[in-house]
Amino acid sequence: MTTNTRTTSGTSGPRATRRKPGGNREGLVKWTFVLPMMLFLLLFFCYPVLRNLAMSFQQWTVASFYEGGSPFVGLDNYIALVTDPIFGGAVLNTALFTAGSLSFQFVIGLGLAVFFQRRFPLSGTLRGLMLLPWLLPLVVSGAVFRWIYDEGFGVLNQLLLGLHLISDPIPWLSSTQYALTSAIIANIWVGVPFNLVILHSGLQAVPASLYEAAALDGAGPWQRFRMITLPLLRPVIAIVLMLGLIYTLKVFDMIMILTGGGPANASETLTTWSFALSFEEFDFGQGAAVGNLLIVVALVFALLYLRSIRNTFSSGGERG
């Protein structure tokens, strides 16, 4: 009886404390994969964001880089922004630019996705060509549209004059009436392929048998689209709109190339205003404050996006 007890206790002790051979090595290998990503995030994301946040509470000028003096000013930079006459116009232009671009990009992208759902000769080639605006660098796209909009020899004015739709050339980029609209149209052209690709992928997951059954029941094209396509495409639509919203909020290249925020701040958005404050007026504190406002807005929509993704997967798991 005593011998069995000793044997059992003797064998149970080493088993409880025994480590898996190579456990430390496996942990080290895992860290070698995770550590570069952590360093990348710390250096190129966390540090710039935290540094920008600290700068927005300081009086940063060109002299600060040479003399090192950047006194703490609290919320003065944010108060100066809100009370600046440009602030209201920049916020409104940002909202109009985002809403106009996003709505037309989505509607046109959805229409093209439904169109390419049908197979016809050269449909794949034509769909591939539709991706060119998305693949081109924004600098190239902006330069092309700047040539199209040129008042003197732009192709758009020449076309309208040739069709006798206008009598005088329209200053698309130098008029306060047309500058923002021109930038929105150019950005729509750039963003349509993204909506087309994602929505077309979502349509491929809709079973064709549902359309066939609805057609046998007498449902027309619009009824099939409204009762089958839109409900089943709703999770993909939410993702496309959320990602498009976050992307459009921070558009800088297209507006800067076309109008530079002008004329008379007619196309000034928060992104171009932040650039102007930092690199034209050299008030880096206020420029950082505008950037932080954009970060907060983008963060809110990013959290909404993550929440929509979570709800999509949870609802999918419940149905499964």
Image (cartoon, rainbow, N blue to C red):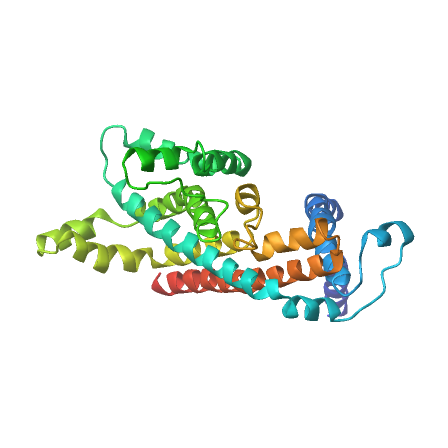
Left or right: 15 as drawn, with respect to 252: right
**Observer-nearest of 137 and 13:** 137
Residue 231 vertical placement versus 151 (above, below): below
Pick the quarter of the image with the N terminus.
bottom right
Left or right: 312 as drawn, with respect to 88: left
Residue 191 vertical placement versus 51 (above, below): above
Left or right: 110 as drawn, with respect to 31: left
**Observer-nearest of 254 and 259:** 259
Residue 158 rendering spot, x and y as whole percentages: 36, 33
Looking at the image, the residue that sits furthest to the front is: 167
Residue 318 vertical placement versus 124 (above, below): below
Q: Is residue 15 visible?
A: no
Residue found 75% across the figure and 48% down from its top: 24
**Observer-nearest of 84 and 216:** 84
Residue 125 rendering spot, x and y as whole percentages: 33, 29
Residue found 49% across the figure and 37% down from its top: 146
Residue found 60% across the figure and 52% down from its top: 272
Residue found 23% across the figure and 35% down from its top: 119
Residue 81 rendering spot, x and y as whole percentages: 66, 66
Pick the quarter of the image with the C terminus.
bottom left
Looking at the image, the residue that sits furthest to the right is: 67
Residue 75 rendering spot, x and y as whole percentages: 74, 71
Left or right: 154 as drawn, with respect to 212: right
Q: Is residue 260 visible?
A: yes
